Amino acid sequence: MKNGDIGAYLDSLTPEAQETMLKMFSGKSEREIAEILQNEVQALKALRLDRVRDVSDASVSFVLFSEESDDGTVRTRNEAVATFTNIGGIWKSTGLY
């Protein structure tokens, strides 16, 4: 994503996640898609694996932490769950949720 490599990004996804992303990118040029991918990564101040959520031989889920803020009144924490599925010995992302 950082390099805007659309093919590598799509190859890292499960077939279902690829279909979802292709629908989302419908009507956009390769340049526009590459910029979207790059902008998503550049917007992250940090991205770290916070904890493993679920593990099996076929899938694994991680909680990813990207940002935390505390203004003295409200504390917020941005997290997403990343799930990967083992397809033919290759781990593919189902996307972030």
Image (spheres, rainbow, N blue to C red):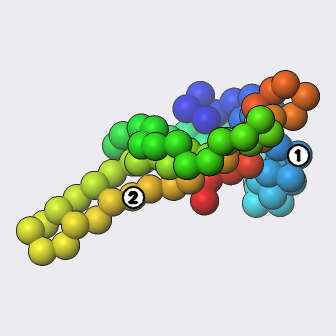
Quarter of the image with the N terminus in it: top right
Rendered location of residue 27, percent (x, y): 82, 58
Q: Quadrant of residue 2?
A: top right
> Dot 2, how many residues are within 10 Å of its Cα: few (below 14), some (14-19), or many (20+)?
few
Could you say which is closer to the camera, residue 88 or residue 12?
A: 88
Q: Residue at x 17, y 62 (%)?
A: 70
| Residue 94 image offset from top left, x and y in percent | 74, 48
List the residue tagged with mark 1: 15
Reading the chain from its start, which is encountered first: label 1 or label 2?
A: 1
Q: Mark 2 belongs to which amino acid? A: Asn
Residue 85 x/y as whole percent? 77, 41
Could you tell me which residue is drawn at 44 percent across and 56 percent down?
79
Q: Badge 1: how crowded within 10 Å, few (<14), some, or many (20+)?
A: some
The residue at which mark 2 appears reads as 78
- Residue at 62% across / 48% down in the picture? 54
Question: Closest to the observer: 88 or 45?
Answer: 88
Q: In this rendering, would 50 be left or right of 8?
A: left
